[in-house]
Image: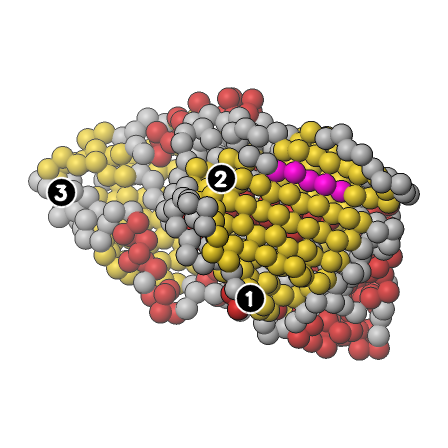
Amino acid sequence: MPTCLAAVLSALLLIVNAKAAATADTAPDTGTDPSMVVDKYIQHFVVDTDGSYRLTVDNVKTIVLARAVQAHSQYYISYNTSLDEVGEVEAYTIKPDGRRVAVPPEQVKDQQEPASGDAPMFQDTRLKIVVFSDVAVGDKVAVRYVLKRKTALFPGHFEDLSSSQFYASKQFHLIYDMPSSMLLYADAAGFVPVPASSAPGRQLYQWQYVSGPNRRIEAESVSYLDYGKRLAVSTFPNYAAFARAYHTRAQEQAAVTPAIAALARELTAGLDTPRAKALALSEWVRRHIRYVAVYTGAGGVVPHAAATVLNNRYGDCKDHAILLEALLAASGIDSSAALINSGNAYRLPDAPTLGIFNHVITYIPALELYLDSTSDAVSAGYLPPAALGKPVLLAKTGKLAQTPSMQPETNRTLARFEVGKNGRGSFKVVRTAGGAIAEPYRQAVRDTAPAERALFVERTLLALGQHGDGAFDAGLLDGAGDEYRMGFSGVSDNFADLPGPAGVATSFNFWGGLGESVASMAQEKTRTQDFICPGIDAADDTAIAFAPGIRIMALPKALSLNDAGLSYQASYTRQANTVLVRRNVRFRHAGMICTPADYVRLRPLLERMMRDLKSQIIVKGG
């Protein structure tokens, strides 16, 4: 799910650094990328009482490895023409002998934010790109610039969120020069306050990053913001005050116009319950309002008017939510915007900041129902996986709440293989996705070109180490509903290595089946970080029929496990010359997050399951 609320510069830096950390070629057990060293990063805000500010950024980096040259030969400054002015840009490359190669004005390029290229409502979003000259390993690249925020996102308030970069850092200094009348609240981890002298009428706050190695980000772990080094600062004393500020700026945009009222009547005609009406309205917005993901902009916290969004038929998440709120209001259903993190952050800092809230969904209190009308792959009534078990801030009431951690979701595979004497096998597979995952599977197939669908079977076989081809049955793609069925059939030229004794696999991962669910949980040998552990309900029934003359010599042993919220059963039954393999796995946890202690209990079970999934039927051909 893409993000859409405006993030300040430090939050944008966090996203870039987190991605770098996740892909870095690093030494074991560390997240520090050795390809670049941060010599200096100073972020200095001078804030006025109305919330406007002057931000000075001073950044110097050393290129250590060749793979960092491409990534760090440009510097991106994101801003908005209606809110910001960017100036005093000074950039240069410093060669090892001390020589400076200045970046000429023509190499500081201004361009429109790519995501807003075909969306006139967002065409004031800009990127200023600094292209350094003559960059090589051993060089330093330096940039200094000033960004003036002319109009505060929240009048009379200021907030910021920063995190450590995943590189060795010699100096990382955050400075906030505030009016004495604006108390700054802070939530710091891995940043220590630095004493500072304040000018009359001002209060100077400073924090210094505590340098040291970063822990490697483990697979499916929660956000680094949840456990790592970060600094959140805010003039909001609590989340209720933050919600009031957001709601004050957004509420006027939800006006119900005659066109919105007429559309609501049309969409809910014949529906008797508020829930049915709410789902119909959300589904219409999801299907008919194009999502435009703009990461910064004048609409950082202010959606466009619902009528404008309806007329233009596109918008970001706030725009989707405001139109849905107006449609619901026209149908007599009260709702509220719910601010949420759409990534893997599950902890809110003590100091309220926009940086942690990068998405907006809709909450209907009378139905205790959350709706995300921006999701093109999740139908109304369900939430994307990234929105489950998350803290949310309800804009109308200022209350903190939490989205459901579980929703109905089933995954079933029914397969039959016919194995000939030469090892060649024909097969037929039916996949059924139920509940929350029905629409994601349906949408994925819709988005796949027919020519690509034709190659699906061949590529699936290649992924399984087999060669062959077949036909893909896409099922019913035009409708919706809580169940989606697709299938494919074909022939594998090398299903079994016959004649002679051979092992025949008992598990086949066909596009997100049971085996992939187990493998996803078992990606790490050990864990030191909390991790995302969604519920699982999957079952595979496989029949493998061997031709006369092929002797079945041995079957795997049945397995039954039930502990730590994880249930797994596998059975192997022979009926004449056919082997029936039945597996099911179900996992339920109290929430979406498991701890390292939980993993200590789960890991032995997962290892036994992985061994079972690799088990084989031993046969002998003539």
**3 and 2 marks in contact (CB < 8 Å):** no
Q: Is residue 565 left or right of residue 493?
A: right
Vertical position of residue 183 compared to residue 307: above or below:
above
Q: Nearer the viewer, mark 3 or mark 2?
A: 2
Tell whether 532 sits left or right of 8: left
Looking at the image, residue 503 sits to the left or right of residue 213; the answer is: left
Residue nearest the viewer, comparing 372 with 142: 142
Q: Which residues are magenta?
A: 172-176
Pointer 3 residue: 498
Disc 2 marks a residue whose amino acid type is Val
In this picture, is 333 found above or below 59?
below
Q: Compute the Cα span from label 1 to label 2.
A: 26 Å
Label 2 SS: strand
Q: Are marks 1 and 3 in contact (CB under 8 Å)?
A: no
Which mark, residue 37? 2
Give the class, few, some or many, for how many residues have Cα within 10 Å of label 2's Cα (few <14, many ≥20): many
**What is the C-alpha distance between the residues marked 1 and 3?**
70 Å
Observer able to see residue 366: no
Relative height, residue 100 to residue 578 (above, below): below
Residue beneath the point at 62% across and 48% down: 58
Give the residue at x 84% y 74%: 257
Count of numbered circles in the view = 3
Which residue: 53% across, 26% down?
528
Q: Name the amino acid, label 1.
A: Pro
Kind of residue at badge 3:
Leu
Q: Which badge, 1 or 2, is on the more N-terminal residue? A: 2
- Depth check, front residue: 170 or 599: 170
Image quarter of the C terminus = top left
Name the residue nearer the viewer: 518 or 543: 518
The one nearer the camera, 3 or 72, is 72
